Image (cartoon, rainbow, N blue to C red):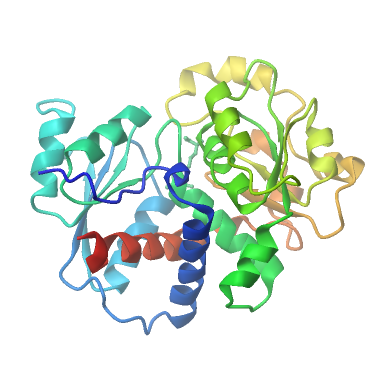
Amino acid sequence: ESRSNLRHFLTLQEYSGEEIINLVDNSAKLKATHPKNPRILEGKTIAMMFSKRSTRTRVATETAMANLGGSSLFLGKDDIQLGVNESLKDTSIVVSSMADCIMARVNGHKDIVEFAKYSSVPVINALSDRFHPTQILADLLTIKEHFGGSSKNVADTKNLFNGMVFSWVGDSNNILYEMMVSLPKLGISLNISTPKAHPVPKDILEYANQSKLNKDTKITLCGSPTEAIHSSNVIVTDTWISMGMESEKKQRLKDFEGYKITMDMINKAGPRENWVFMHCLPRKQEEVDDEVFYSKKHSLVFQEAENRKWTIMSVLQYLLSSKNQ
Ligand code: CP
Ligand code: NVA
């Protein structure tokens, strides 16, 4: 039986700024106390139904679950009946009658909503075409670690985020949308540069604007990558060809001409000295050059990847705690 009071994790749009900060702070704690964390998920199971590939999300979730005493079942698209012999609804009812949590990586976002509708246990979105909530939590933990020093105080995390400016140069995609529905609530401004052929959706933009923490929080649609980067010190991009868009590659490479992030572009744009670069990975060659991507001084990409684990651990603890059961 699905329950209307059950908390899921489909997008950070459904979480308040305070809740997001608590999840990030708790992940920092779990990271610091590993491997001495109590086995709070002893006997619990997570069913991971993935209809697309994954390295980070899968490894993060399976190791996090194991470290807290639980276990996971990885169910790829060729392993289960879903989509071929069985509906999403029936799959959700059956799997949630046995497992304590469902994580799913889907194509259309409506599929994850459907999973949640019929599930009797919490559902985590492991990426849809619209949102990727566990990714942005990891990005926030990474920023907190890099700019926040060793402070463990929740109020400090709040102050740290409030007033920051992130720039996005690249596709209009799930990673950007997840940032747009979460960062403004924390007082983080966003400078967005996407090609004209790939505008941001109106509804996401509207939500971003109406969820801003204060009057200094700004969502700016910029005319060029350099304009976006100019007043920001957290530069973010992602692939131009998301999973499922492989057939559009030729056209997309044309559309994104001039959007490759290079050291030269950043130097010309003139961001503040302590700028950092982030990318959710997997990275392809075309969206960023090696000098930026592997920069010891500026690139946080591998720290960001590892932080997928600690933030997913925090989400698991939150959703599987007795309050939500
Ligand atoms: N960033 C991310 O979700 O990576 P995977 O696709 O490897 O899980
Ligand atoms: N935008 C990318 C993110 C991969 C983690 C995709 O959807 O394929």
In the depicted structure, whether residue 128 falls above or below residue 32:
above
User: In the rendered view of the protein, which quadrant contains the N terminus?
Assistant: top left
- Determine the residue positioned at 86% across, 48% down: 271
User: In the rendered view of the protein, which quadrant contains the C terminus?
Assistant: bottom left
| Nearer to the camera, 155 or 261 | 155
User: Where is residue 278 shown, x and y percent of the image?
Assistant: 65, 50
In the depicted structure, whether residue 93 falls above or below residue 296:
above
- Determine the residue positioned at 18% across, 31% down: 88
User: Where is residue 38 shown, x and y percent of the image?
Assistant: 30, 81
Residue 214 shown left or right of residue 69 in the figure: right
Residue 39 shown left or right of residue 203 in the figure: left
Residue 153 shown left or right of residue 47 in the figure: right
Q: Can residue 82 be seen here? A: no
User: Where is residue 197 shown, x and y percent of the image?
Assistant: 65, 15
- Determine the residue positioned at 79% across, 47% down: 232
Residue 316 shown left or right of residue 254 in the figure: left
Q: How many marks?
A: 0
